[in-house]
Image (cartoon, grey):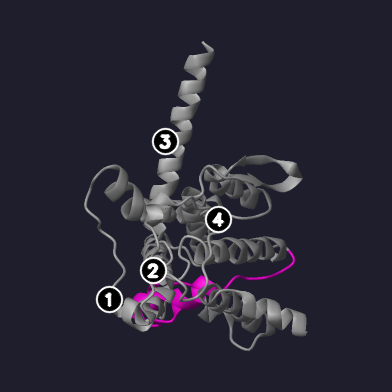
Amino acid sequence: MSDIGDWFRSIPAITRYWFAATVAVPLVGKLGLISPAYFFLWPEAFLYRFQIWRPITATFYFPVGPGTGFLYLVNLYFLYQYSTRLETGAFDGRPADYLFMLLFNWICIVITGLAMDMQLLMIPLIMSVLYVWAQLNRDMIVSFWFGTRFKACYLPWVILGFNYIIGGSVINELIGNLVGHLYFFLMFRYPMDLGGRNFLSTPQFLLRNVSSAQDCGLRRGAGRKEPWSQRKLDPGSATSELCAEVPPSASEIFLVGQADRRENTAETVLESSSIS
């Protein structure tokens, strides 16, 4: 039990609470402590009966049974794996920014769920996070079942097909991918690649109330030793010691990745021209 406790405490904070709620709420419904009927997102109950908890419970609840247990466990693994990678990678030391991403994706999914009568929101939110990770690490080679290997940018669509095969719904995965793409486009692609306006920024109340390594570093007078744009980063495994120095933002990591891809493309072109 101590090993399980140590493993659970090693999960980064936001992912840990999300993971725990995604285990606890289905368990409560399975044991019959609360009727699962209160967990679904029913537009009529939410809008006209003011049962305002439903968007929250629908995010954590999943009807676990003989036909859905494997699908639930697979998506629980995706939650742990890719939320942890994002929280300790691109959003390392910036929990307010990561929490804002989750809130933005969640609000978009809730609105879509009410419009499309989607009663469960667990899988769409997990897929939206997985999509953002895949785009920030789009050139990384990932391994999937049966030894298949491909670039991370294709992972959300492979998982969409995989979940459909094992009993999921394409709609849930598709909505998650689209919401993840919306966040990624507004936060990174549009302002950085297309020179557009930055529509998304973390609200001040989150920055004030969610502790971060950056705040701690500023209090101690720690600063960056060199611009992060000049460093070589691995977005999938970038970590920093708490309060040692200000970690890179997700946007900085994205810019470094873009620069690396342009350098690799230029080197490939030069090699091809020299060979010819």
Which is more toward the observer, 223 or 188?
A: 223
Residue 262 - label:
3
In this view, the mark in front (2 or 4): 4
> In the drawing, does residue 66 fall left or right of residue 253?
right
Q: Which badge, 2 or 4, is on the more N-terminal residue?
A: 2
- Mark 1, other Cα within 10 Å: few <14 / some 14–19 / many ≥20: few
Q: Which badge, 1 or 4, is on the more N-terminal residue?
A: 1
Taking the view exactly as shown, the residue that stands out farthest to the front is 225
Q: Is residue 53 magenta?
A: yes
SS for callout 1: helix
Q: Which badge, 2 or 3, is on the more N-terminal residue?
A: 2
In this view, the mark in front (2 or 3): 3
Determine whether label 2 and label 3 are within 8 Å by CB: no
Q: Which badge, 4 or 3, is on the more N-terminal residue?
A: 4
In the rendered view, would you say 275 is above or below 172? above
- Mark 4, other Cα within 10 Å: few <14 / some 14–19 / many ≥20: some
**What x and y, as percent, mark residue 61?**
57, 74
The answer for how far apart the CA atoms under marks 1 and 3 are is: 34 Å
SS for callout 2: helix
Determine whether label 1 and label 4 are within 8 Å by CB: no
Q: Which residues are magenta?
A: 40-66
Q: Which residue is mark 4?
A: 236
Q: Quadrant of residue 147?
A: top right
In the rendered view, would you say 210 is above or below 148? below
